[in-house]
Image (cartoon, rainbow, N blue to C red):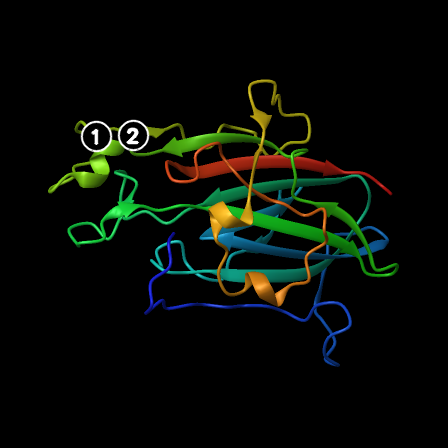
C-alpha cells in the first residue's frame, strides 16, 4: 500500500533483544530452545509453527492503512516448521483500494521476518529466497481495472482468481512441488513504513512477496529452519 501524508499508522512491537527491563511473555510450544520472532508486513500476516497459530497481526486486514511490526517469544525445537499467511489490503475482490476516489489504485504488499535464538543472540532464520510460496488470490487480472470508474469484481477488466487455502497445507509433509521459491523485492520497491524501522534487521533478512507486488493479494509461504 502506498503512503499518504495523512496515514493512520498502527504499531505493535514487543520488546526486542536487549531493550527494556520488563519480562517478556513466552508462548510455550514445548521444546528446549527459546526463540524470538520479529516480523513486519504491509499489510497483514499470520504465523503458524507447525499447525499451531502462534501470532496473528494485531491490526485487522480490514484496516486500510496499516504498517506494523510484531514480535513474539516462543519455545520450540529444531527443525522449526514455519507457515505464513501474507495479505495485502484490498477493499474487495477487484484488488483495489480507495475505490471511487481520485487515488483509486492497486495496493502493494511486502513482508520481512527474522528469528533469533534468545540464549545465543544468533539470528537462525530470515525471510529470503529459501521460502516456498504460492499465490492464492490475484486481482485484478487486468491492470486496466485500476482506471475503471465503476470497478466490479468478477466483471472484466476486474476479474480475479481466488484459490482459497489448500487442505492440509500447514502439515510438514504437505506436497509443495507446485509451489515456487518466493520473490525477493527491494526496499525501494516495497517502501516499508513505520514499524519496519523499529527492528534491527539482520543483513540477510529480505523483503519477500509474490512475483507481483500489486496484484498478488494473498500469499502462503512455508520454510523449515534447521539448527545452525
Residue that mark 1 sits on: 154
Which class describes the residues within 10 Å of circle 2: few (<14), some (14-19), or many (20+)? many
- Relative to residue 84, is residue 158 drawn left or right? left
- Residue at figure coordinates x 29%, y 33% from the top left: 140
* Residue 146 against residue 71 in the figure, above or below: above
Q: Position of residue 115 (x, y in %)?
A: 72, 52
- Relative to residue 218, is residue 39 drawn left or right? right
Q: Which mark is residue 160?
A: 2
- Residue at figure coordinates x 65%, y 34% from the top left: 129
Along the viewing direction, whichever of 31 and 156 lies nearer the viewer: 156
Q: Quadrant of residue 81?
A: top right
Along the viewing direction, whichever of 41 and 187 lies nearer the viewer: 187
- Relative to residue 138, is residue 100 drawn left or right? left
- Relative to residue 137, is residue 126 drawn left or right? right
Which class describes the residues within 10 Å of circle 1: few (<14), some (14-19), or many (20+)? some
* Quarter of the image with the C terminus in it: top right
Say if mark 1 contacts mark 2, CB within 8 Å: yes
Q: Secondary structure at mark 1?
A: loop
Q: Decide which of tag 1 and tag 2 comes sooner along the chain.
A: 1
Q: Secondary structure at mark 2?
A: loop
* Residue 166 against residue 116 in the figure, above or below: above
Q: Position of residue 127 (x, y in %)?
A: 65, 43
Inter-mark Cα distance, 1 to 2: 6 Å
Amino acid at each position: 500500500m502506498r503512503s499518504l501524508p495523512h496515514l493512520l499508522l498502527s504499531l505493535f512491537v514487543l520488546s526486542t533483544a536487549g531493550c527494556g527491563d520488563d519480562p517478556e511473555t513466552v508462548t510455550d510450544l514445548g521444546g528446549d530452545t527459546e526463540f524470538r520472532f520479529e516480523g513486519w508486513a504491509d499489510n497483514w500476516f499470520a504465523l503458524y509453527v507447525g499447525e499451531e497459530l502462534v501470532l496473528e497481526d494485531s491490526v485487522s486486514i480490514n484496516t486500510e492503512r496499516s504498517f506494523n511490526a510484531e514480535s513474539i517469544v516462543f519455545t520450540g525445537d529444531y527443525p522449526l516448521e514455519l507457515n505464513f499467511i501474507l495479505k495485502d489490503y484490498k477493499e474487495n475482490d477487484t484488488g483495489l483500494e480507495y475505490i471511487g476516489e481520485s487515488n483509486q489504485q492497486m495496493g502493494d504488499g511486502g513482508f520481512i521476518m527474522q528469528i533469533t535464538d534468545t540464549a545465543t543472540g544468533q539470528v537462525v532464520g530470515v525471510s529470503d529466497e529459501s521460502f516456498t510460496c504460492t499465490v492464492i488470490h490475484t486481482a485484478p487480472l487486468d491492470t486496466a481495472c485500476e482506471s475503471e470508474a465503476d470497478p466490479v469484481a468478477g466483471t472484466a477488466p476486474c476479474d480475479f482468481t481466488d484459490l482459497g487455502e489448500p487442505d492440509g497445507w500447514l502439515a510438514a509433509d504437505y506436497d509443495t512441488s507446485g509451489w515456487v521459491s518466493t520473490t525477493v523485492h527491494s526496499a525501494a520497491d516495497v517502501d516499508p513504513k513505520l514499524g519496519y524501522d523499529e527492528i534491527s534487521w539482520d543483513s540477510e533478512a529480505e523483503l519477500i512477496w509474490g512475483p507481483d507486488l500489486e496484484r498478488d493479494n494473498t500469499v502462503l509461504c512455508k520454510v523449515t529452519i534447521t539448527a545452525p
